[in-house]
Image (tube, grey):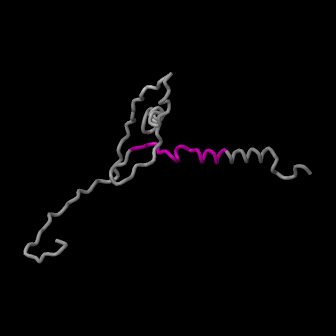
Amino acid sequence: MASTRNNNTLENYKLQQHQIERQRDWIMDQTSRVNQMSAYPCYGMNNPSMPSTLLCNNPVEVESFLFGISANNFVNPVPVPTYQPKPLANVKLFDKVPLYIPKQQFVYNQRPSMYN
């Protein structure tokens, strides 16, 4: 009785491969990690994590230059890359309320204390 379970059938193999493929697609889905409408936030929020390809047109060249890769290559020197930023919009979720600071009032003819 070599193969009495459904573990070795062709349909079961196809089902397992389909499950593995769906799990891989779920884990490697780019839309779950990177917003399709990326923008810089205005006041009140922290900057989100963005991949370098959204911030710059040549991120690999800039990062290689900053890390000093090929800095000592005297045979074929690498030129200094120019930074080519991508324009990103700013997102404003709410209007900023102006801050009103009241004028300080001083009261005279009081006893002196260490807190005055």
Residue beneath the point at 40% across and 35% down:
86
Please tell me whether residue 20 is drawn above or below residue 53 in the rendered image.
below
Residue beneath the point at 42% across and 39% down:
55
Residue beneath the point at 10% across and 76% down:
110
Residue beneath the point at 37% across and 53% down:
45
Return the residue found at the far bottom: 111
17 relative position to 4: left or right: left
- Total marks shown come to 0
- Residue 93, image x, y percentages: 35, 52
| Viewer-side residue, 2 vs 72 | 72
Return the residue found at the far top: 75
Quarter placement of the C terminus? bottom left
Is residue 100 highlighted in magenta? Answer: no
Return the residue found at the far left: 109
Please tell me whether residue 107 is drawn above or below residue 98 in the rendered image.
below
89 relative position to 17: left or right: left
| Viewer-side residue, 62 vs 95 | 62
- Residue 99, image x, y percentages: 23, 58
- Residue 69, image x, y percentages: 50, 33
| Viewer-side residue, 94 vs 65 | 65
- Residue 73, image x, y percentages: 50, 26
The magenta segment is 21-39
